Image (cartoon, grey):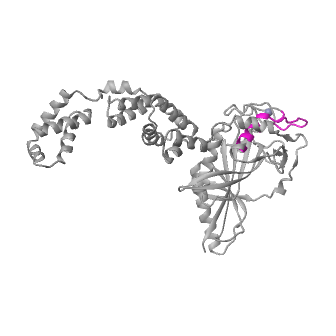
Amino acid sequence: MEFETVIGLEVHAQLLTNSKIFCGCSTKFGAAPNTHTCPVCLGMPGVLPVLNRTVVEYTIRLALATHCSIARTSRFARKNYFYPDLPKGYQISQYDLPVAEHGWIDIEVNGESKRIGITRIHLEEDAGKLIHDETQPFTYVDFNRTGVPLIEIVSEPDLRTPEEASTYLKKLRDIVRYLDICDGNMEEGSLRCDANISLRPVGSESFGVKTELKNMNSFRFVQRALEYEIKRQRAILEQGGTIVQETRLWDSDKGVTHGMRGKEEAHDYRYFPDPDLVPVLVTDEWIENVRSELPELPEAKKARFIKEYELPEQDGVVLTSSKDLAAYFEACVARFPQPKKVSNWIMAELLRELNRDDGEIDQCPVSPEALADLLKMTDEDVISGKIAKSVFEEMYATGKPPETIVEEKGLKQVTDEGEIGKVIESVLTAHPDQVEEYRAGKDKLLGFFVGQVMKQTQGKANPKIVNEILREKLRE
Ligand SMILES: [Zn+2]
């Protein structure tokens, strides 16, 4: 039997606010344990939470960027469960009235565009962090993260392959980064992804029993965990077995998922409106204010790059894949206004070096100004295109400006006709047989002579001048 995979993602994004969602404590990462806490986020009796306005504003930004409808009234609910990192015994979240619903994100997979629905975007507070020390018979708890604002973005079950899922997740990360509302760092946990996955016979309308996957802290792991889970579920179904609805943890060392616990239903959490918090009212005016200050988003930027800089579609996709890369490109073009040439260099040389080191563009040792200066030197025939590539590698390795490297290594292109003429003379004298063959009509030998001249000048002779003088001398 043929099966179809159905995937939906639940993504948690930590918002980049300075203070927590319901108190004034700092959200700064990496402080000494339990120093960013107060009676509110420690869940002491008698305290009252007060909503951080910026948190709502960031959610409106994302809702607008993902075409959601924004609730003019939403409210917080208590999600009741006990866990040692949750001091109140409930998490403040949203249930029946989330801030935003019914949006979408378009993704591109294998050259085709696909629209992935967004069910809802809601706000909640993060829990603390448990630290398990294997050498001790107890567990530590750090409440610094308790009350850090999170938005949860729930997709429709519209994803059909692990590749679609990771593409959607990347697109969502691009958007939150463009909006400056989350740093999108999966390794540090500021962007977290859970996946619901089930299989059903092709052609079936109803969904199969799903499992929920957790603990996938990189794009690669999301893809691998989903691939593993598809295989696991298919094997069970093919043998006539049934899938148990449960939460499973991805184990990246072993490359497998483990059953963790049976799936809770919403009623297990006994949600009810939080009596300590008033409803959240969002006015049309507030929405329009946020809309007017939205930055240019990836789709719009891509369209503009293609039109304004006359770039092919693929260049537009790559260059706008991150806000920083797009800014790098534009800074470079501002100084060296040949967009296609700049784009080629970024896509080939620069991204090759960056990808090899798993580096990010904002830590690139070659500034956009330095790259522009290098391209200017090729344009003005100071160095050849081939030498420029080796200069670029040196710039990337040392951070030196191109002029210094060219000067230090004596890489300037030779354009002196007299000097080139001398080299050509010596090449022709050294290869009398080839000269005779050429003159007898074997035109292809011209490439051989050019190669010899380049070899003797270490690639520094201006190829155009070499060609001109060679033809002339061979005619004699
Ligand atoms: Zn606090």
Q: Is residue 138 visible?
A: no
Ligand 1 shows up in the quarter that is top right
- Position of 50 with respect to 326 (left or right) is right
Q: Where is residue 453 in the image (x, y as percent from the top left)?
A: 20, 36
- The residue at the point 18 percent across, 41 percent down is 449
Rendered view: 324 above or below 194:
above
- Position of 262 with respect to 6 (left or right) is right
Task: Please provide the residue range marked out in magenta.
Answer: 39-63
* Residue 287, quarter of picture: top right
Q: Does the magenta stretch include residue 51?
A: yes
Q: Is residue 191 magenta?
A: no
- Position of 331 with respect to 81 (left or right) is left
- The residue at the point 46 percent across, 37 percent down is 339
- Quarter of the image with the C terminus is top left
Rendered view: 412 above or below 294:
above
Q: Nearer the viewer, residue 474 or 65?
A: 474
